[in-house]
Amino acid sequence: MAIVVVGGSGRGVGKTALVCGLIAALPELRWTAVKITTDDHGQTKPIWEETTAGRGSDTARYLAAGAARALLATPPVHGHTPTPDFAALLNDLWSKIGPDANVLFESNSILDHLRFDLCLMVHEGSSPASHHARHKPSFASALRHADAMVAHASADGTIADGLCLAGQEPMPIFDLAALEQVSAEMVAWLRLRLGPALRS
């Protein structure tokens, strides 16, 4: 069982596109793809399963890319100061997904509540200097969990030790000409990194 989290520096940077790229690049894993959201998407249930592949929603795109299942999940909110209950959401999710599924999460906020095998962060630029650009507040916290950075660029490429954060090992930056088409070099890296999880 492999658990991969895809986060990002802000809205519209390509998180969903990268999730679709991973699904297409590793079809043998028969991914269950889960979008975590706190937005109101018009669904009455905290966990809703997509059944129609297409381009009309992020979960429909997951199925179109080849996901075995696609779910939209919203954590319940409790307390006078509303706080998302990710523990309750994950308990509910695991009961619906099952113990042996390979799961792709699209979310920054889930990282502090989940044991995962790999975290990929999408950013709007591959230059380390660009990481000081505007980003969502959860990005700085999520970045400390990252194993690699992914950026939309004019051509595929890899910067082996492209991002060095204080107290962390250097991590690669994968430049992709199209986030929905993961490069062969990145696929090889993913297979190497996910190997132990898939064998366990």
Image (cartoon, grey):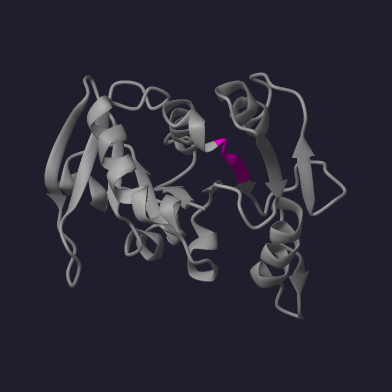
Query: Farthest residue toward the front?
Result: 199
Identify the residue shown where x is 35% and y is 63%: 145
Vertical relation: 92 (above or below) 2:
below
Vertical relation: 35 (above or below) 56:
below
Q: Position of residue 146 (x, y in %)?
A: 33, 57
Total of numbered circles in the picture? 0
Vertical relation: 110 (above or below) 15:
below
| Span highlighted in magenta in the image | 30-34
Q: Position of residue 12 (x, y in %)?
A: 48, 35
Q: Position of residue 185 (x, y in %)?
A: 22, 31
Q: Is residue 34 left or right of residue 93?
A: left
Q: Within the magenta stretch, is there residue 31? A: yes
Vertical relation: 51 (above or below) 11:
above
Question: Where on the picture, by quarter, is residue 184?
Answer: top left
Can residue 105 be seen here? The reply is yes
Identify the residue shown where x is 46% and y is 50%: 4
Q: Is residue 7 left or right of residue 95?
A: left
Query: Farthest residue toward the right?
Result: 44
Q: Is residue 28 left or right of residue 160?
A: right
Q: Within the magenta stretch, is there residue 135? A: no
**Helix, strand or loop: magenta stretch:** strand
Q: Nearer the viewer, residue 95 or 63?
A: 95
Q: Position of residue 160 (x, y in %)?
A: 12, 44
Identify the residue shown where x is 16% and y is 47%: 129
Can residue 84 be seen here? The reply is no
Q: Quadrant of the C terminus?
A: bottom left
Question: Where on the picture, by quarter, is residue 150?
Answer: top left
